[in-house]
Amino acid sequence: MRVAVFGATGAAGRRIVDAATRRGHDVLALSRATGVDVLVLDQVRDALAGADAVIDAVNTPTLHAQEATEFFRAAAANIVRASAEHGVTRVVALSIVGIDRNPHGYYAGKLAQERVYADASVSHTIVRATQFHEFAGQIWSSGGWGPVHAVFPARLQPVDLGELAEILVDAVEDAEAGGIRHVAGPRVEELPRLVKAWARATGHRGIRFPIPAATDQLKGMRDGANLPDAALDAPLIVGTIDFDAWLATQRTR
């Protein structure tokens, strides 16, 4: 199958490209770095010529709700329109667990993305994942002021990116796929512990400074809104690689 991966040079996209390639698919790795801007419809149209399926793993660095909403809504609309024009048989979009319970900031954009697909005629599957194991390192890097690194309280059930990539390719290969699937790691964790363990294992020195969850989005994460909800009528796929097992592989790098 010819699979177009949007966001192919991002953290998730690279793993998706690798997984799909290993499984024998003809992969189109699409991103601005490869000359395809998902916000430019003509470029998306040209890129999807001959594609059988799409995996949408696009991302944006903004944390602001309006900017994220505009980006994800426009990107999904272009993918939907071009997919319909080219007769793409299925689209799989990577999203985030709990965004309907925590629709703030960046997550507002992901919810808008899902709604574009929900209103589209093209066959699609939404795969909602929890935070990746790499999230701990991202928090360390983004919350640093010199030697001081701010860490907010949050409950997570982080998932391994390699396992998630395989699940996304599974969804592309499944002719009966559709609806929403949830993916999470095997253990619920506290973010401060993950950040401390990551810094120690990777040789990053500094002072961890606890801060309160100051925004609505962070308050939701503090209260566990980004954990899988057993009450939701959606399949839950639980990975096997927990944070500590993943972290052990990072020590050797």
Image (cartoon, helix red, strand yellow):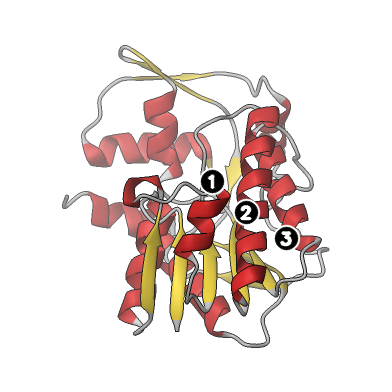
Q: Residues within 10 Å of mark 1 (few under 14, many from 20)?
A: few
Q: Residues within 10 Å of mark 2 (few under 14, many from 20)?
A: many
Instruction: Choose top left, top right, bottom left or bottom right for residue 3.
Output: bottom left
Identify the residue shown where x is 53% and y is 61%.
Answer: 45
Q: With 54 as the anchor, is 69 left or right in this view?
A: right
Q: Amino acid at mark 3?
A: Tyr
Please tell me whether mark 3 sits on a helix, a strand or a loop. helix
Image location of residue 160, percent across then percent down:
43, 60
Q: Earlier in the sequence, mark 2 or mark 1?
A: 1
Residue under label 3, please give it.
Answer: 117
Mark 3 or mark 2: name the one nearer the start of the chain: 2
Q: Dot 2 corresponds to which residue? A: 78
Q: Position of residue 102 (x, y in %)?
A: 75, 40
The answer to whether any part of residue 57 appears in the image is no
Return the mark for residue 40. 1
Asked whether disc 2 touches disc 1, contact meaning CB atoms under 8 Å apart, the reply is yes
Distance (Cα) linking label 1 and label 3: 18 Å
